[in-house]
Amino acid sequence: MSAARRLAGVASSPVRDLLALIDRPEVISFAGGLPAPELFDLDGLRAAFDRVLSAPDARRHLQYAPTEGNPDLRAQVAARMTARGLPTSAGDLLVTTGSQQGLTLITTALLDPGAVVAVEEPTYLAALQSFQLAGARLVTLPGADLAGWERVLASERPTLIYLVPNFANPTGRTMPAAFRAAVVELAERYGAWVVEDDPYGELRYRGSPVPPLAAQPSAEERVLHLGSFSKIAAPGLRLGWVRTPPSLRAALTVAKQAADLHTSTIDQAAAAAWLAATDLDAHIGRLRDAYRERRDAMMSAMPATAPEGSVWSDPEGGMFTWVRLPGAVDSATLLPRALAKDVAFVPGAPFFAGPSDPPTLRLSFTTHTPSEITEGMRRLSGVLSEVLSA
């Protein structure tokens, strides 16, 4: 028997496939967007689970629970979002099993087969998979050309616009404040929903925060905002949330019920206990300090690593830099050579919804220490110089 036809056009993630290939300690991988495990608050999370399971009412945290999520957790997330400039109440939030599930629920609630979704180029690969699985037709938005965005919206009339405005995956770029305001105005004018995917927003290493799209005037009934604990706590918790417009809350809740009834009760309770006992600003400050040093190590090594004529992004935060090699080389053909030298990256082509740009590649700088990054870039330099000078 064959799989359902809707899976036919959905390619496997090369990032997930690479993780299976590079599980060797000698490999320095810049491929996966993995937080540094040594920075997880292991003691704090262990204590949070212990407190929850040692409480007199511990058994309720092992029971079925409301679909919308743990009330304490929602209240704490709402308070932090409000403090960061996006006024939010607990009732605005739906807790999800990772923010990726939030995106899946949105596609379930909003996209019929053939619906049009507008995306930036390149964009988050798993979002492309989600939209393809829903049978959507993808159209691309032309960089920072606002007039071009309006032409696409006017001609294609997308149901949904998908954006990663802070330190985007894979490019590391950040959308300017004025452009965000203009995008929300365009979405209102042409009747499109906006999904603002923001897993990296708290990981800023220089510059000032930019107000979210969801905080723009007229955004209340137009923008769905996705958040996650994966980058600020630990991805193994699989906890995220959707900040939903009032008109969509019931539909998203039904979609969540159909998907898994609710997110893990015990994990939500432990996350709420961890937030209550943790100086989250101090914890995120430590993440920023460590990741800033790692980002700087990669940026410092880049001129000696990338061949002459290469260009790369200089991210203000997040986890990634985006490199374009000179000429017409296909970065995918370089990957086997890189793996043979015990270094890994992600070729850029799969991140494109339209025609790809084969000379591109994505590098992640958060997983390894600065000294490991320096050594990994030395190995990558050898691969690139061998191939591109031939």
Image: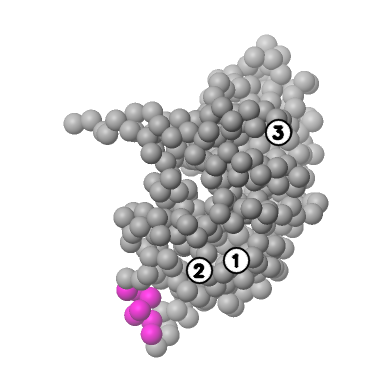
Which of these two is toward me, 276 or 174?
A: 174
Q: Amino acid at mark 1?
A: Thr
Q: Give the crowd class for mark 3: few <14, some 14-19, many >=20 residues within 10 Å.
A: some
Q: Picture quarter containing residue 299?
A: top right
**What is the x, y in percent for residue 316?**
75, 46
- Magenta segment, which residues? 57-63
Q: Which mark is residue 88?
A: 1
| In this view, 53 is above or below 186 | below
Q: Quadrant of the N terminus?
A: top left
- Along the viewing direction, whichever of 10 and 39 lies nearer the viewer: 10
- Prevailing secondary structure of the magenta residues: helix
Q: Amino acid at mark 2?
A: Gly
Cα separation between marks 3 and 2: 34 Å
Percent x, y of residue 240: 50, 58
- Residue 108: tell me if it is visible: yes
Spatial CA distance of label 1 from label 3 is: 29 Å
Name the quadrant containing residue 30: top right
Helix, strand or loop for disc 1: loop
Where is residue 351, by image quadrant? top right
Image quadrant containing the C terminus: top right
Q: Give the CA separation, mark 1 to mark 2.
A: 8 Å
Q: Is residue 139 above or below residue 34?
A: above
Q: Is residue 31 visible?
A: no
Callout 2: SS: helix
260 vs 380: above or below:
below
Number of the label disc, if any, that sits on residue 146: 3
Give the residue drawn at x 43%, y 85%.
Answer: 55
Q: Earlier in the sequence, mark 1 or mark 3?
A: 1
